[in-house]
Amino acid sequence: MELSALIMKHIDPSFSVLEAGCGLGYEAQLLAKAGYAVKALDKDPRVVEAAARRTGQDIFRCADLYESDEKADVLLCVNFGYIESADDLRRLAGHAEKKIVCVMSRHTNRDNVSRQDRTEKVKSLLEEAGFRFSMTDFSLDFDQPLLSMEEAAEFISWTYPDDDVQRFLGFVEPSGDSEYPFKLGNRKNMVLFDIEL
């Protein structure tokens, strides 16, 4: 809810929104409830089906953004893809008429490869390309929904490759959601880029 409220501050209510990599659809659901015209894409059919069941909304489609011709006034990316080059930026901009709202983690893993704080790189790239943009730093709880303790172990070993999986499994707790009965609580430092096109 906190994240959706922040996102809405950056999107005019009259704008249509396309969310890329929507996952279980939490942000898309809240934007739609607030009156935004929303389409939400994810390439994993399991999460698209779960999002539709969970929300009862017909806004979710199984598709890879980069293989889609979907477009809206605003492209919303929450922890979706990387902006590593001007080409990445062009590919994202091809799906938006007015702006891109991109939410990224500022965390860096110990291995410094699988997850890096790319904020300064993205900022430099946008400046070099002459885009008008703003940045908003924030922190919030970003719980990871999980199907099982086995999935929790896989997620932890992928996210924290050099750490003890068993230690992190102690932080997995019941979610109260029958579809995804477990969650891993996680407070993250984030940045929101509001990029005008």
Image (spheres, rainbow, N blue to C red):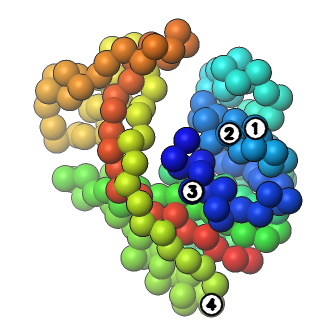
Q: Residues within 10 Å of mark 4 (few under 14, many from 20)?
A: few
> In the rendered structure, are the residues bearing label 1 and label 2 in contact, judged by CB atoms less than 8 Å apart?
yes
Q: Residue at x 34, y 28 (%)?
A: 184
Mark 4 or 2: in front is 2
Q: Are marks 4 and 1 in contact (CB under 8 Å)?
A: no
Q: Residue at x 70, y 36 (%)?
A: 29
Residue 33's mark? Answer: 1
The residue type indicated by label 2 comes to Leu
Q: Residue at x 42, y 66 (%)?
A: 137
Q: Quadrant of the C terminus?
A: bottom right
- Which structural element holds mark 4? loop
**Disc 3 marks which amino acid?**
Leu
Res 83 seen here: no
Look at the picture and state if 151 lies above or below 178. Answer: below
> What's the distance in space between the residues labelled 3 and 1, CA to CA?
15 Å
Q: Is residue 136 left or right of residue 44?
A: left
x and y percent of residue 140 in the render? 40, 48
Q: Earlier in the sequence, mark 4 or mark 3?
A: 3
Mark yes or no: residue 116 visible: yes
Give the distance between the C-alpha atoms of the residues marked 4 and 1, in whole angstroms: 35 Å
Q: Secondary structure at mark 1?
A: helix
- Residue at 52% across / 64% down in the picture? 192
Upstream in the sequence, badge 3 or badge 1?
A: 3
Mark 2 element type: helix
| Residue that badge 4 annotates | 130
**Percent coordinates x, y for residue 28 in the rendering:** 69, 41
**Is label 3 in a helix, a strand or a loop?**
helix
Name the quadrant containing residue 86.
bottom right
Q: How many marks?
A: 4
Q: Which residue is mark 3?
A: 6
Pointer 2 local density, CA inside 10 Å: few below 14, some 14–19, many at least 20: some
